[in-house]
Amino acid sequence: MILCEEECEFLQNIANFLSPKDVELIFVEDEEMKELNLKHRGKNKSTDVLSFPLEAVNSALPLGSIVINKTLAQEKAKELHHSLDEEIALLFIHAMLHLLGFDHEVDKGEMRQKEEELIRLFKLPQSLIVRTEAL
């Protein structure tokens, strides 16, 4: 189950496919995301998505929290000519994989491969990792 502030039923299938655990989903604006990124990652700039895994001490605990920058998601969706729902789904998949322990900054392509598999399965546009690598 996804606990979120807005309508997000379109993400429920993705969440259920990846994990039976609950996930908190929070949408923020650009300035709040910049503050979170500085506080938790030491980077004084905004970002599109952050994930905060919970320690697996108790199986009843949620998997973690995902924070999506709605401002940047809207901008990126418009720039890439796809829907806001598609952009949010891409960001959500990316963050879910981080919550599940994937890390594209240190792995040998496993996260990219899994992300590509999921975007094909859910018929989404180009993945976040692929877009970032193309820059």
Image (cartoon, rainbow, N blue to C red):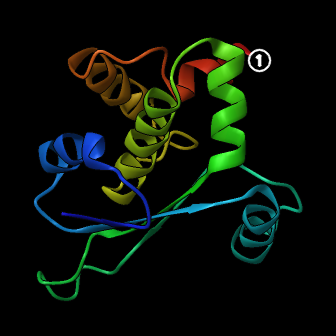
Q: Is residue 28 above or below residue 53?
A: above
Q: In the depicted view, which residue is nearer to us: 72 or 113?
A: 72
For disc 1, the marked residue is: 135
Residue at (86, 55) in percent of width and height: 45
Find residue 68 and report its horizontal and vertical position in percent. Answer: 56, 54
The kind of residue tagged 1 is Leu
Q: In the depicted view, which residue is nearer to us: 46 or 111?
A: 46
Q: Is residue 3 above or below residue 92?
A: below
Q: Residue furthest right?
A: 44
Q: In the depicted view, which residue is nearer to us: 49 or 113?
A: 49
Query: Dot 1: within a 10 Å radius of its alpha carbon, few (fewer than 14), some, or many (20 or more) residues?
Result: few
**Left or right: 126 as drawn, with respect to 105:** left
Answer whether residue 48 is visible to the viewer in this image. Answer: no
Residue at (36, 53) in percent of width and height: 7
Residue at (12, 84) in percent of width and height: 60
**Left or right: 46 as drawn, with respect to 78:** right
Q: How many marks?
A: 1
Find residue 122 and report its horizontal and vertical position in percent. Answer: 25, 22
Q: Residue furthest front?
A: 7
Q: Is residue 71 above or below residue 82?
A: below
**Splitting the image into 4 quarters, where does residue 89 fall?**
top left
**Left or right: 109 as drawn, with respect to 123:** right
Q: Quadrant of the N terminus?
A: bottom left
Label 1: state its secondary structure.
loop
**Left or right: 111 as drawn, with respect to 37:** left
Residue at (21, 83) in percent of width and height: 61
